[in-house]
């Protein structure tokens, strides 16, 4: 998919989108734009369908959602799943105990216990995953999904586009979108964490210290920043003093 797009960040606001109240919470990002071309083709002798779409004015926005509303959205989406799989796990555990005590299947009891254990373990695992998404604020997509459903019918946001995408969906669909350029602070932070050093050291592995290196040692050269005339390492891509990116 193609996106003819810019990027727009909304200012942080303390008004919750759902309850319109003033409460602490988080900004949830999403993308909105207009679809100007949509092509759907079915592959010959195959059930595969190829979809190609082009969007314009695709930009990033953000709305504030309070912690209470976010918890309610997670509760509505994940609590039924947690209860359902939890009941499966408890039911299988009870059935296994009853079968083991009464030996209801005779010599086949061991196989019955295996069936109960398999489905009970599966139900317990899925219940744990549902509980994790219920109580975790960042691993659950419930808030983003509920937000996108509301935005599609909101007259205030319909003017921004006819298609809405969450952050993860946007990353998957628009793989050809160019990455945003790094700022000077991001380049300096990358160099401090060793990103630039690893890039400079890429190549043949160094010789062991016991073996002399026949190649002449290269002298590290420094250079002057063209903006503030401060002496900086020759490999630097940004000046740590004036915070400007070097050409």
Image: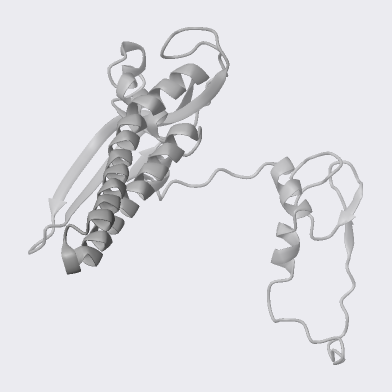
Examine the rendered structure and indicate whether residue 214 appears above or below residue 190.
Answer: below
Examine the rendered structure and indicate whether residue 102 appears above or below residue 201.
Answer: above
Which residue ends up furthest to the top in the rendered image? 21
- Give the image quarter of residue 202: bottom right
- For this view, does 236 lie left or right of residue 67? right
Examine the rendered structure and indicate whether residue 171 appears above or below residue 62.
Answer: below
Q: Residue at x 64, y 45 (%)?
A: 182
Figure coloring: one colour
- For this view, does 209 lie left or right of residue 189? right
Q: How many marks?
A: 0
- For this view, does 215 lie left or right of residue 107? right
240 and 97: which is toward the camera: 97
- Give the image quarter of residue 243: top right
Does the image show residue 164? no
x, y percentage for residue 164?
34, 30
Does the image show residue 227? yes
224 and 167: which is toward the camera: 167
Which residue ends up furthest to the front in the rendered image? 102
- Give the image quarter of residue 146: top left
Q: Residue at x 16, y 61 (%)?
A: 105
x, y percentage for residue 65?
48, 19
Examine the rendered structure and indicate whether residue 36 appears above or below residue 225.
Answer: above
x, y percentage for residue 54?
29, 40
Q: Residue at x 14, y 51 (%)?
A: 41
Q: Residue at x 51, y 10 (%)?
A: 15
x, y percentage for residue 119?
27, 54
Which residue ends up furthest to the left in the rendered image? 45
């Amino acid at each position: 998919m193609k996106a003819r797009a810019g990027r727009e960040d909304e200012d942080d606001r303390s008004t919750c989108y759902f309850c319109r109240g003033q409460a602490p919470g988080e900004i949830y990002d999403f993308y909105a734009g207009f679809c100007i071309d949509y092509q759907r083709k079915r592959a010959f002798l195959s059930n595969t369908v190829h979809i190609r779409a082009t969007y314009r004015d695709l930009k990033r926005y953000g709305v504030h959602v309070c912690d209470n509303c976010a918890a309610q959205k997670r509760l509505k989406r994940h609590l039924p799943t947690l209860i359902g799989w939890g009941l499966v796990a408890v039911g299988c555990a009870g059935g296994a105990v009853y079968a083991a005590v009464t030996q209801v299947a005779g010599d086949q009891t061991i196989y019955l216990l295996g069936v109960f254990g398999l489905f009970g373990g599966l139900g317990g695992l899925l219940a744990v995953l549902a509980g994790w998404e219920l109580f975790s604020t960042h691993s659950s997509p419930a808030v983003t999904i509920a937000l996108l459903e509301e935005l599609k019918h909101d007259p205030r946001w319909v003017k921004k586009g006819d298609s809405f995408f969450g952050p993860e969906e946007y990353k998957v669909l628009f793989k050809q979108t160019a990455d945003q350029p790094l700022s000077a602070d991001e380049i300096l932070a990358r160099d401090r964490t060793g990103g630039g050093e690893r890039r400079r050291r890429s190549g043949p592995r160094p010789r062991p210290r016991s073996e002399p290196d026949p190649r002449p040692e290269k002298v590290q050269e420094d250079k002057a920043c063209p903006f503030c005339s401060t002496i900086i390492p020759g490999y630097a891509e940004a000046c740590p003093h004036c915070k400007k990116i070097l050409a």
